[in-house]
Image (cartoon, grey):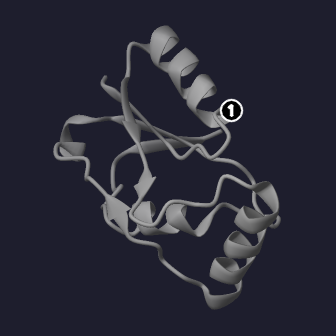
Amino acid sequence: MKTLIAYFSWSGHAKMTAERIARVTGGNLFEIVPVERYPRLYARCAIMAKAERDKNARPALIGKVENLEEYTDIIIGYPAWWHTCPMIILSFLEQYDFTGKTVHLF
């Protein structure tokens, strides 16, 4: 069994949780990073996140999990934005085939 913890963290909370999960599981961390960074000011970030949601956007990502086939368990973490996941999570999910994997969310 090999575990990957993939996370997107705007404020740092998901990152801290991902790091805790990695320590407990011995899993590997992968940060989901957007090409276009989200604004640090909450109000601006909320506007951008809502616009992405309303357009069903798929923001571009930096980096890729090179060896996903090696993992049996994938743990994915992110903040809740506008009653759903940030659209960057859908960008991440649509890049890979998770057939035969156990996927957990936090």
Residue closer to the observer: 75 or 49: 49
* Above/below status of 33 relative to 14: below
Instruction: Tell me what residue is drawn at x 78 percent, y 56 percent.
Output: 42
* Above/below status of 77 relative to 26: below
Quadrant of the image for the C terminus?
top right
Q: Is residue 36 left or right of residue 11?
A: left
Instruction: Tell me what residue is drawn at x 46 percent, y 73 percent.
Output: 59
Q: Position of residue 1 (x, y in %)?
A: 31, 23
Across the whole image, how many numbered discs are drawn on residues? 1
Residue closer to the observer: 38 or 98: 38
Q: Is residue 53 left or right of residue 76?
A: right
Q: Position of residue 102 (x, y in %)?
A: 45, 41
Q: Which residue is mark 1?
A: 13
Q: Position of residue 93 (x, y in %)?
A: 43, 62
Q: Amino acid at mark 1?
A: His
Q: Residue furthest front?
A: 41
Q: Position of residue 83 (x, y in %)?
A: 82, 64
* Above/below status of 72 relative to 98: above
Instruction: Tell me what residue is drawn at x 57 percent, y 31 percent.
Output: 15
Mark 1 closeness class: few <14, some 14–19, many ≥20 residues within 10 Å: few
Instruction: Tell me what residue is drawn at x 38 percent, y 70 percent.
Output: 60
* Above/below status of 52 relative to 41: below
Q: Secondary structure at mark 1?
A: helix
Q: Which of the 4 image quarters holds residue 49?
A: bottom right
Q: Is residue 40 left or right of residue 46?
A: left
